[in-house]
Image (cartoon, rainbow, N blue to C red):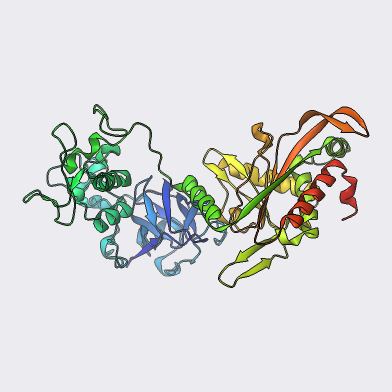
Amino acid sequence: MAQVLEFKLPDLGEGLTEAEIVRWLVEVGDVVAVDQLVVEVETAKAMVEVPCPYGGVVTARFGEEGTEMPVGAPLLTVAVGAPAAAEDSGSGPDERSDEGSGNVLVGYGTGAPPARRRRVRPSGGAAAPAGAPSPAGASPARPGQGRPEPVGAVPPAAAGTPRAARNGVAPSRGDGPVPVISPLVRRLARENGVDLRELEGSGPEGLILRADVEYALRAAATGRLRSTAPAGSGVPSAAPAFDAPADQVTSYADIASVVPGASGVSRGTTPAGVRVPLKGVRGAVADKLSRSRREIPDATCWVDADATELMQARRAMNAAGGPKISLLALLARICTAALARFPELNSTVDMDAREIVRLDQVHLGFAAQTERGLVVPVVRDAHARDAEGLSAEFGRLTEAARTGTLTPADLTGGTFTLNNYGVFGVDGSTPIINHPEAAMLGVGRIIPRPWVHEGELAVRQVVQLSLSFDHRVCDGGTAGGFLRYVADCVEQPAVLLRTL
């Protein structure tokens, strides 16, 4: 007999508490193998393809694409040991493992190739195999949070009904189900006393989004709502009710009229502008930069350097044949040599213990701008790599950043960051330190400028270097010494040879 197992969104590490479903890779009725990739999610750090630790038939999915799910919320249910699954894999039910691999992160699977996907079409229109328990009773809800509704499960009575209705999105209000699929939206409404039945969503097919609930709460906070609901309104007494002129919002059902994106409605009662949710990568960047500004007493120093000889050295290296050496790799090699001389800047501060922790290894982060926002991939053990190895690793991580395939491991654990903002055509900047690191080196554009060289005015390739540092780990003398050493290596690359 088949056993229905529930696969929950795993802890993706680094304190992440939620992820957004970007793309489902399986449908209800598909046969999946152990560790087969079933869903692509976006966390605040990276895009992650999540493998399922169970093999069998998918009987239900929880959450549509675009839904934010908390860690521990059900993703899907799998009927393990089903005859259909065994037939597809070529083995009997007794030969399959009901335990699964337990591997739920990208790169940690069994390595076995995924089984061929096949849509199971059982007789009678039921999605789950005969005898399988109902997915709704697979596991209890987490404390303080309602269990999300299965989005992909199709009961026999629903065969032939519209897809929106099968997914729990009612095409009309009436007494049908509430058009909301995100457990986060439900929790937000429940904790703030908002009756979802009185809301009209601004999402597709009237789907209630987090923005709809948040708008109702903002409206209440700005005085556009009364503190108590009128008798017989259907709104809980703990929830606010609207108290506005007749030509403005008059009920929860009118929220969609002022939500950005609603059609055919005047927005004269709301502030002008486009509201962009701070979530995903943009939200993670906002949180981290804000924390850096709150916790790190940073200072910045800068210096102009003649990079002519560095550029000539790079051309000579690349002309000799072999893999091309990038300018970023040469700057990284200079950074690691400078950190060996000034280890104070390769550290972090433990305020609980009131200690400065100087780190033995240099894991060098570098800022990369992508379509999803700013990310900082990390080159592991940069101090142990030569210029050629650094170039190769920079190239791999840059390509992964462009394609959105960076893993959480690629984006965490940095000890020092190199920020080449010169690619944007600017000369200088005051970088914000990448918390919990202690320093960041910024590099501006390299352009021809008048420069006094060997006592005469000449046109040289000049770059501005800036160093933001945590003033708790060192004083200006150390920071200045680090930056001066970097500038000396840029101006005279032979200086670097003395440290190799």
Front residue of 407 and 331: 331
Residue 222 visible in the shown view = yes
Q: Is residue 119 above or below residue 53?
A: above
Percent coordinates x, y for residue 304 in the rendering: 77, 39
Residue at 34% x, 31% y is 272
Percent coordinates x, y for residue 32 in the rendering: 43, 55
Front residue of 321 and 214: 214
Residue at 90% x, 54% y is 498
> Quarter holding the N terminus?
bottom left
Residue at 87% x, 27% y is 458
Residue 149 visible in the shown view = no
Percent coordinates x, y for residue 479 in the rendering: 74, 54
Q: Quadrant of residue 424?
A: top right
> Quarter holding the C terminus?
bottom right
Q: Is residue 452 left or right of residue 36?
A: right
Q: Is residue 177 above or below residue 453?
A: below
Q: Is residue 372 left or right of residue 177?
A: right
Q: Given the current orientation, which residue lies at the most extreme left position?
A: 232
Q: Is residue 419 above or below residue 355?
A: above
Q: Is residue 76 above or below residue 402?
A: below
Q: Is residue 432 left or right of residue 216?
A: right
